[in-house]
Image: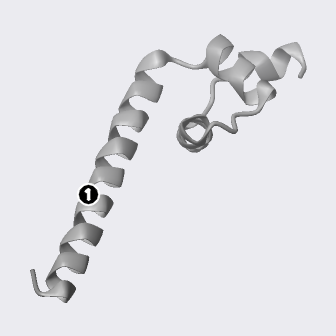
Amino acid sequence: MSEEENKKEPGLWDVAKSVLAAGLGVQSRKNYERDFTAGKPWQYVIVGLVGVGLFITILITVVMTVLSMAGV
């Protein structure tokens, strides 16, 4: 990775992909280095919290749907 690419600040889509990849444990070394050299921590915290909130909402929705279909 060139020095110029390292200094380029990641956009919202790049941050979201990095958070998802890190959450799944498949973050590439190139993106990892970019995140820690050019990224701002608050971006990753906010995107991570939104992702966790979305995951919990989907999980609750699936459980409630399955329970309602089971007649509970």
Residue 31 versus residue 60 in the image, above or below: above
Q: Quadrant of residue 17?
A: top right
Name the quarter where the C terminus is drawn: bottom left
Residue 63 versus residue 27 in the image, above or below: below
Q: Give the camera-side residue of 34 and 4.
A: 34
Q: For the point 70% across and 23% down, which residue is it?
A: 32
- Give how far across and how far down residue 34 sits, in percent: 71, 21
- Give how far across and how far down residue 1 sits, in percent: 89, 22
- Give how far across and how far down residue 62 sits, in percent: 29, 70
Q: Quadrant of residue 10?
A: top right
- Give how far across and how far down residue 25 sits, in percent: 63, 36
Q: For the point 36% across and 31% down, which residue is it?
A: 46
Q: Dot 1: within a 10 Å radius of its alpha carbon, few (fewer than 14), some, or many (20 or more) residues?
A: few
Q: Amino acid at mark 1?
A: Thr
Q: For the point 20% across and 87% down, which residue is it?
A: 69
Q: Which residue is mark 1?
A: 57
